[in-house]
Amino acid sequence: MKMNYMRFLNKVSLGRKPSPIRVLTAILQQSPPSMISMAGGMPNVGTFPVESASFKLRDGTHLEMNPTLMKQALQYCPTPGMPGLVEWLKTLQERKHNQHGLLNMESVDLLVTTGSQDGICKAMEAMVSPGDKVLVETPVYSGTLAILKPMDCDLLPVRSDSNGLDPSDLEKTMSKWNLSDVKDKNSDIPKLLYIIPNGGNPTGHGLTLNRKKAIYEIARKYDLLILEDDPYYYLQFNEPYVPSMLSMDVDGRVVRFDSFSKLISSGMRLGTVTGPKIILERISLHMQASVMHASSLSQMLLLQVLSHWGYDGFDHHVREVTHFYKEKKDQCIRAAEKHLKGLAEWSEPSGGMFLWLKLAVPDTYPMITVKARSREVLFVPGNAFQLDDRRPSQYVRASYSTCTEEDMNTAFKRLAGSCRRHQSPQVPTAVSSRRPFQRHTKDFCRNLLLLDMAIFYQFAEHHQPVLSADGCNTFSRRARTEGYDSPGQRTGSYRRVPTSPECIMDMPGLRDDFYTNLLDWSSRNMIAVALHNSTYIWNADSKVCQRVQISVPGASPAFYISSLSWDPRGRSLAIATNDGHINVCDVEKMTNSNHSQLRERCPIGAMLWTDIGIIR
């Protein structure tokens, strides 16, 4: 199938042009010593304080970086990477992912990036536009969510299990569109599928060969580009390795991301992107305008190590690293079986560094961030890997990469204690009879709170305005007259309060920074809700929802609404933005009646109506 790569690239990416200076740097790298360059603004290597270096490997071997090599290591290099390293890695990719000759290596290229994370980020920035639909397996790596969420795209979850992403769920999701939509430029059919095929983060699960083949065929059917994020490819615990998606790519629809963080060093910040030349050219142009290239010093050190090893030595190192993490995984499973049986569920990881635990608690976030932390143990709550991190999750991610077996046992023992405490009902503390006044005060406040809620529900039923300033005194007087002066249950009957909601509004666009101020209920029984740069007013009586248009002169393109506040009469709504603007909207006429701006263009997080105006 012939690929039309223009379909996947966004406007920003297509608008990038080569940097003339970066082009000249690449030419100079390939030129003979007789070439005289007065083109690039390269610093003189004679001014660099470091002249040479020696590195000792764990087997005792010393690698020397002589002055000639050090000059290259401390100087600018071509954006795709040091030529010697790029060629070594291209050969490695062909050895590992083209054993059956399915790849057209003439149309495939490789870039060295500042870690695979930077490659993923730049690839997505080259292909994702606001409003695009992107397919991601769930749960999904939190770093990927950090890249995609600010892009204002629509993330479509695809279910995964102990065998990785489920092809049947992918087909179910894609079947909502017609095949003809693939060629329709105005269609919103998804174009990208992001997956971690081996040792998934956070699950530790990997795709089987049959699933990979099924996923690739679905991608061909709907013309999807696959982003194969595979930092744990060399940490598969079972041999032979499951072949990569790149190895079966006959169309040129796989962009593959590899990492040296798990094999050589995470601090060197080196990874690679392998895929179609047209796609990689756009990523390279982005690098030219941002990081220019990955660290030359890191690249030179990696090249020296790989050249010393050769491909057989690299394979030997991979086997050692994989064996190390397999033992860590086995230790982690033993510790979990010892301390978490009956409190958690898990399936054994097929690779990687993580154990994905389902705990017998409704939501792990409060337990992990408060209770477990107070017991001096850290895990990652499962909601960090959800598309909507506000939803509760029963899962936690446990990393076994750096812990000793003793530490794992201690950690899981502490986690088990937190689980049991979280499950147990809170037992009231006995109060001594020698302190009757304190006990009476506590019970009175508890009953007063019940009365407070009863009055609130009455207001909700009758659409009454809010209480006056002496509302607390009113509560106190009613409490005493209605028999709440002493502890006990209320003897009168409550009004019947509906337990099902009258209206449900799905508002995924609520911003995280000021979300508590983005909803306000007026005294006239109307609710105002802000979603990004729009405001909606819902009338509880008429059940009508209207959008309020506001005018913000000179606002930045990224402006959004940061807070809302109704006036006491419920006739005017103040709408504030992150640029320091305040618009006052006349709700009856649905028009802006006033506008002001702070001197400092900063977000307005809260407002309060007073007799003299609005306090912010």
Image: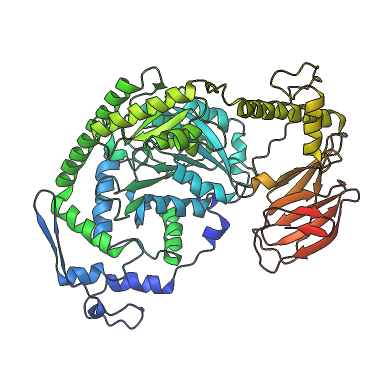
Asked whether, in this view, residue 586 is left or right of residue 300, the answer is: right
Image position, residue 53 (x, y; %): 16, 66
Determine whether 319 is above or below 54 in the image.
above
Q: How are the colours assigned in the image?
A: rainbow
Asked if residue 162 shows in the view, the reply is: no
Asked whether, in this view, residue 96 is left or right of residue 211, the answer is: left
Q: Nearer the viewer, residue 193 or 571?
A: 571
List the single residue furthest toward the right: 589
Image position, residue 289 (x, y; %): 45, 66
Image position, residue 247 (x, y; %): 33, 39
Count of numbered circles on the image = 0
- Residue at position x 35%, y 53% in the image: 115
Asked whether, in this view, residue 592 is left or right of residue 142, the answer is: right
Q: Nearer the viewer, residue 510 or 352?
A: 510
Q: Nearer the viewer, residue 501 or 39?
A: 501
Asked if residue 546 shows in the view, the reply is: yes
Image position, residue 46 (x, y; %): 23, 80
List the single residue furthest toward the front: 434
- Residue at position x 79%, y 57% in the image: 614
Instruction: Find residue 45 and report its image quarter.
Output: bottom left
Instruction: Find residue 457 and report its image quarter.
Output: top right
Q: Quadrant of the C terminus?
A: bottom right
Determine whether 199 is above or below 590 in the image.
above
